[in-house]
Image: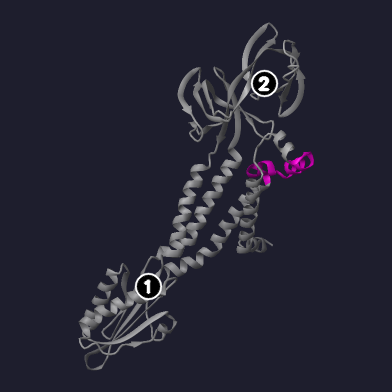
Amino acid sequence: MVRKIYDFLSSVKLAIFFLLTLAVTSIIGTIIEQQQDPDKYLREYGETTYKIFKFLGFTDVYHSWWYILLLMLLAINLIVCSIKRLPKIWKVAKEPRKTFPEGYEKTLKVVHKITLAGDIKEIKNSVIDSLNKLRYKPEVSKEDEEEIHVFADKNVFARFGVYIVHFGVLLVLIGGLLTAVFGYRGYMNLAEGTSSNLVSFFSSPKIIELPFSIKCNKFFIDFYPSGMPKAYISDLSVIENGKEVYRKKIRVNDPLKYNGVYFYQASYGQGVATLQIKEGNKTKTVEIAFGQPIELSQNTFLRIVSIDGNTLAMGVEFIQNGKVRAGVIQPFNFFKVPGTDIVFSVVDVKPAFYTGLQVAKDPGTWVVWVGSTILILGLIVAFFIPHRRVWTRIKKGKEGKVTLVIGGMTNKGTEGLATELEEVLGVLKSSYCPNTPKEENDG
């Protein structure tokens, strides 16, 4: 049973299935906008289709449980495939036949046989020098008075190119898993002069509390004569422990980055409300932009989502322990927060602009970049760098003649190997075969 599971997980067909499945789901994640406001999905697809998308996880593909599972299964498949095939490749690369017995040349891709005149040891040294110049690593595998064998190879590491590719893919998968599990994308709406550490998710009621706050010092917006926005810029500060620790003006595609969290200039809107909040004898006044949550008590948040221009009735959301309760309130009236002793009232509403920030934490980015680099290097090694081996047999004959047989094999680029052997033969012919007799080519 264990053997069957092992063989199944090491299947190349299974790897292809996972890759194709991930490709298809990634296409879905590209076609369907991810982590958007539910209202947008309802407008574009309708209630039934939205519910299906929500159930299948298509509105947040890259954080869905099944996408994470696919990444994990593909990673396991690559690891098991590599473990299963590594011993064989290791043996081929590290334990080659080094002697060159009679008849072995029939198994080689390129073979030359030539008769020379000279001392076999001098010819051996000439062969070794020529192979060294071609960046081989030659060694004498057999030597006596009658016969000498020379073995040489180069680029042994090329045999492991596929494993470099596998390692790169694994790093990319690990980076994807890190982002899927520990990363997030959300938004913040900040009016001028306000700050917050609360990040709302696009497609769920989840709210994240940052260990620092972002303050909007100033928001600049410029319009074309047609009324379309021309440019919008936010002057932001990072507030930590009550002090400003970093400040930057951000534009589209020029975010603020702090502690691994990116704040992108994404949108803008209108609507800023002033709230008066009472809890017992304590009263505080805060200003918030529409769409930005405010924490009323532990795990209880309030967010103003809309306003009726005629009646000033406001649509609000109470988020408690991850659950949303929608309601409608009127300004200047106090309302009790469900499940608490807190009451609040909207005491002022202004049509002021606020900046819309997209907030992203992607802890796997650098892992993906490293993995992608290793993957590219692995592909270069696997497809363009050949592992070549050369065997030479130098045998003393009659009347001072020497028979030399040289041959080789390569995992790619046989023409290149043939050219290199021709270079070695050219040196030998010029030194030990002045009249250049006819060569016997067995290749």
Q: Residue at x 29, y 72 (%)?
A: 131
Rate crowding at label 2 as few (under 14), some (14 to 19) or many (20 or more) other CA atoms within 10 Å: few
Camera-nearest residue between 264 and 293? 264
Tag nearer the camera, 2 or 1: 1
Q: Position of residue 217 (x, y in %)?
A: 51, 19
Quadrant placement of the N terminus: bottom right
Given residues 13 and 101, the one toward you in this image is 13
Q: Residue furthest right?
A: 48
Residue drawn at the location 58% of the way across and 30% of the way down:
228
Check the image and name the residue furthest to the front: 225
Give the Cα distance between marks 2 and 1.
71 Å
Q: Does the segment drawn in magenta span residue 91?
A: no
Mark 1 element type: helix
- Residue with the mark numbered 2: 298
Picture coordinates of residue 32, whole percent (x, y): 66, 44
Q: Main secondary structure of the magenta part?
A: helix
Q: Would residue 366 be visible to someone looking at this image?
A: yes
Name the residue type under label 1.
Gly
The front one of 391 and 192 is 192
- Local packing at callout 1 (Cα closer than 10 Å; few below 14, some 14-19, many 20+) is few
At 62% across and 53% down in the image, what residue appears? 23
- Residue 144 picture location, percent across and down: 28, 82
Q: Which mark is residue 416?
A: 1
Residue 67 in the image: above or below residue 77: above
- Element type where label 2 sits in the image: loop
Above or below 390: residue 368: above
- Residue 400 position in % (x across, y down): 22, 90
Tell me where the magenta segment starts and ends, as one range.
Answer: 45-65
In this picture, residue 161 sits left or right of residue 328 = left
